[in-house]
Image: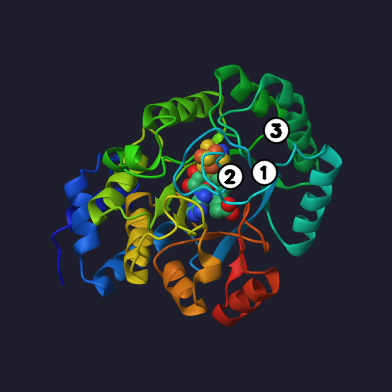
Amino acid sequence: MTMTSAPAAERQADPAVPRTQWTVAEAVELFEQPFMDLLFRAQQVHRAHFDANAVQRSTLLSIKTGGCSEDCGYCSQSTRHNTGLDREQLLKVAEVVEHAKAAKAKGASRFCMGAAWRGPKDKDMETVLAMVREVKALGLETCVTLGMLKGDQALQLKEAGLDYYNHNLDTAPEFYGQVITTHTLADRLDTLEQVRGAGINVCSGGIVGMGEGRRSRAGLLVQLANMASPPESVPINNLVPVPGTPLENVDKIDPFEFVRTIAAARIMMPTSFVRLSAGREQMSDELQALCFMAGANSIFYGDRLLTTDNPDTDRDEALFARLGLRPA
Ligand code: SAM
Ligand code: DTB
Ligand code: SF4
């Protein structure tokens, strides 16, 4: 067994030992372990902190679709790409509440509302705040992802009862500018600071399969794990290639490398929920089971992500039953 990365992995796994900073080299060493060793360690870390048979389920709803000013190379919703997506207005509060009720009835514990904005305009905040209040009142955890936030907007969201804010770092610093040029990683970090400062839980992860190398996958995880407080929730998205985006023809990531990314995230952020996010529709049940084995313990649940398909709830219920998983 290769033990080269054991010291770094051990000190993250033991809550009695103060958390130390990961280097990219240490994270790359994790990825380089033999697959079975990596999965075994990830499963050990997972079991030290979580029920290994419980998976949290969040349902997503796009509350404002398309027409986004930003140029994120993977995204169907940017006005800079010709993806044929129709731009829609912000949904009405009552429509959102209906979707949230249906999600709860299907067994979701969290409801995430996403808007294709660079950031919310002050005039839209009242509507979003009402959505948060009303979804929260249904007894669901609330999450929104609205782009860049100002400090006062974060405080308003907290006051309305927001539990989580999703804002991904998406990729490593050296790769960021190849995917997005209309805002910077520093802008993303600034929003995360506003979110933390307001006392809202942080949901932040990224995308793999964009043509980045292993070092960049490790670099994404290092940024997340080294935060003063790592995100409570870490979505790992596998690129869903959207026709008309600059990344539509990029080579797919090796599925085992995707599982390695989940395992490394689990080891580096032992107490965070790691969400197996976009890309499940294209995955076999067996590959998803490997991701759960590697420490993923959250999914998006419901037949739609924002603009692309996700497995329907019947398929997920069947998968949970076959694997003996239960909702967290
Ligand atoms: N506009 C907000 C923002 O950028 O934060 C919120 C919505 S944005 C669509 C949320 C996240 O979805 C992105 O940061 C990215 O990680 C993920 N995402 C978007 N398109 C994707 C795709 N085609 N495949 C995989 N993940 C994607
Ligand atoms: C996240 O990390 N993944 C979700 C959520 N946060 C908002 C979005 C995935 C979007 C996949 C592409 C689409 O459906 O447009
Ligand atoms: Fe806009 Fe978010 Fe899509 Fe980027 S990822 S283009 S900010 S909706």
The N terminus: image quadrant: bottom left
- Residue at horizontal 47 percent and vertical 74 percent from the top: 289
Q: Position of residue 132 (x, y in %)?
A: 73, 36
Q: Secondary structure at mark 1?
A: loop
- Between 303 and 132, the one nearer to me in the picture: 303
Decide: is 304 above or below 118: below
- Residue at horizontal 61 percent and vertical 64 percent from the top: 310
Callout 1–callout 2 Cβ contact below 8 Å: yes
Decide: is 98 above or below 68: below
Task: State whether label 2 is within 8 Å of ligand 3.
Answer: yes
The colour scheme is rainbow
Q: Earlier in the sequence, mark 3 or mark 2?
A: 2
Q: Answer yes or no: is residue 74 visible.
A: yes
- Name the amino acid type tagged 3: Gly
Residue corresponding to mark 3: 161
Q: Position of residue 176 (x, y in %)?
A: 34, 39
Lateral position of residue 68 relative to residue 212, left or right: right
Residue corresponding to mark 2: 77
* Residue 293, quarter of the rendered image: bottom left
Q: Position of residue 222 (x, y in %)?
A: 29, 44
Say the numbered circle drawn on residue 65: 1
- Name the amino acid type tagged 1: Thr
